[in-house]
């Protein structure tokens, strides 16, 4: 998922943008932008992307007998 080809072109994933205060991004090309802003100079940086967390498994519906051989 991190290295897929069709990545959403948001400033928060761009090489040229960095985190500034107040939830704004500071772009070297455009200046201050919103994290979901877009421009044609977008270059994807996979290290800025955070993968989605998996949900923890709910084992409460199982009994002790379910885990015995």
Image (cartoon, rainbow, N blue to C red):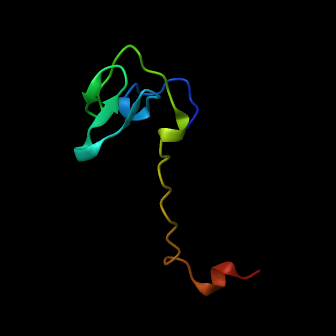
Q: Quadrant of the rendered structure where residue 4 is?
A: top right
Q: Is residue 67 left or right of residue 18?
A: right
Q: Is residue 36 left or right of residue 52?
A: left
Residue drawn at x 30%, y 21% is: 30
Residue drawn at x 25%, y 33% is: 34
Q: Is residue 41 above or below residue 35?
A: above
| Residue most extreme to the right | 69
**In this orientation, does residue 18 appear?**
yes
x, y percent for residue 49: 48, 40
| Residue most extreme to the left | 22
Q: Quadrant of the rendered structure where residue 33 is?
A: top left
x, y percent for residue 64: 62, 86
Q: Is residue 51 above or below residue 58?
A: above
Q: Is residue 3 left or right of residue 35?
A: right
Q: Quadrant of the N terminus?
A: top right
Residue nearest the viewer, comparing 10 with 17: 17
x, y percent for residue 3: 58, 32
Q: Quadrant of the C terminus?
A: bottom right
């Amino acid at each position: 998922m991190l290295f897929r080809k069709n990545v959403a072109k948001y400033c928060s994933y761009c090489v040229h943008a960095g985190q500034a205060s107040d939830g704004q991004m500071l772009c070297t090309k455009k200046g201050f932008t919103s994290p979901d802003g877009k421009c044609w100079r977008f270059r994807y940086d996979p290290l800025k992307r955070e993968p989605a967390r998996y949900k923890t498994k709910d084992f409460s519906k199982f009994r002790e007998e379910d885990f015995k051989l």
